[in-house]
Image: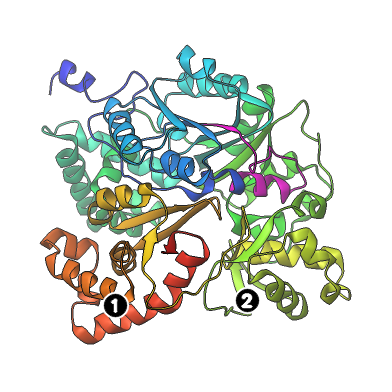
Amino acid sequence: MTDQDQAALWSDSGYVTEIPYMRDYMRYQAPISMAFAAAANGFDAPDYRQPFRYCDLGCGEAVTTLTLAAAYPYGTFVGVDLNPTHIENAEKLAKAAGLTNVSFLVADFQDPGVMEQGPYDFVAAHGVYSWIAPEIQNQFHDLVGKIVGEGGLLYFCHYVRPGSGKIEVMFHLIQSLMKDKTGPLLDRVRAALAEAKVMCKDGAPIFSYHSSLAGYLEELENRDPRYLVHEFCNHFFYPRYFPQVADDLAAAGLHHVGSTRPDRYGLETLFEDEVPDALKGLDHATAEGRASLLIVDQFRWDVFRKQDSAGASQISIQNRLGDFILDSAIFPYGYPKSVTLWEKEVIFDPAAFAAISALANPGQLTIGQILADPTLAAIPVDKAVSTILQMVGSRFFHPILHPAGRPLARGQNKLNLSMPFHAELGARDLRVEGYLSLPSPIIGGVVSLTGFEGLATLAHDGRNRAEAKKELRRQVKKLKKPERKRLKRHRYKKRPDFEASWSRFERRTLPLLLKYGVLRPE
């Protein structure tokens, strides 16, 4: 392959442009998720219930950007990406879905157009930072320091040293093995991966030094080919220690306030036994940076806040959490007695969990109203707050934007998808990607469905349950061979399995779709 051919595959930053990335919704980018992460550590955040401005840097084909634009119709969204194909596909879907509150730019981190549309209340950058050159990372620091408005939030993720050591090794090994190969990137990376597996079987010392590499190779073989290309075929893979990244962003006025991974709220969830003495009594930023080293962080999902100093605006957590509506994320209601948060098994306080879940299940009350309820009078406030954070960390509960609706509807009622975006995204992605992300203005995020559940949901549009069931059988029979595998048709091909899957859908999924306004009775 000539140097000219090579240049056509990468942007100036070294990022792949030949092959579009996977279409995926990233729940951690939702404004409510970012705001809750800040509040869980006692920091203020922009009001996600009022008009706001949102920028998605490196939006890809903009599944997340478009879905959030549908879920927050009063927000203004801007998607930015280097790949013209990504932006072209995003604009087509936005037009087909009738979304008027989102626009897109083909731009890099130095493009003045990105800054001209700011400042923004929320900025997100998922899956970009670790695959760009150090000088481009510095451009990112400079850009977000300018476009995040005062008090605004930045979400971004990155690979982290020391935990990403095995992935760095694999990146450089695959890069080396690809050098003598020709053809499309996808063929070259597959050939390099196969060659690496032979080296592993032959006992190359690196696979003993990083004992988990053998399992990582097996995992990579089963990943989407587009993931392999964008993970390993860029010119750069540059993980950084979290304290270094935090210092660079602090110099731009952005200070760490939390993680959007709810299962890692609080230092106590990061350690199996107890928080080490070396972390006690430290300010938030110092403790978080030191903890990242001690737990051998591999990947992070962080929120930073634009503020004058690291300690600005931090007050009691219960006051910050008070306005969030708490809701059960499952139906019918039933929960385990314990859960693993990050690396630690947490046993729920029985009295606090029972009282809080009874109040939160309908999705009508704010956390402030729950904490003030007489049924919690005997439970200390700090115990109640920590239990709520554990409940959210378990993903059985979550904050939502508006009070939830009724979870049940009569069988003879016809149901309709609540917005055109549902049908447009479903037609495009379910059979291609194997999943469906349906936006809900009630939760400020999505209900994510795969396989049978996704097909069953789309079959309900404009039909009652009997009609939807008949349509679903027809759709299942029509699936093409690649779609059958992607949607796991073997699990419901036979009539008894189909009936069992349908029953689970009616008991567990349909009530949530009604509760969150994804489907509505005629």
Drawn side of residue 473 relative to residue 220, left or right: left
For the point 71% across and 79% down, the residue is 354
The quadrant in which residue 467 appears is bottom left
Spot occupied by residue 334 in the image (x, y as percentages of width and height)? 57, 80
**Magenta residues, start to end:** 33-54
In the picture, the disc for residue 338 is 2
Q: Is residue 440 above or below residue 183?
A: below
Which disc is residue 130 wearing? Answer: none
Distance between the Cα atoms at labels 1 and 2? 39 Å
Residue 484 relative to residue 43: left or right: left
Query: Whole-percent x and y of residue 61?
Result: 34, 37
127 and 23: which is toward the camera: 23
Q: Which residue is mark 1?
A: 466
Front residue of this view, candidates 434 and 240: 434
The answer to whether residue 359 is magenta is no
Q: Quadrant of the C terminus?
A: bottom left
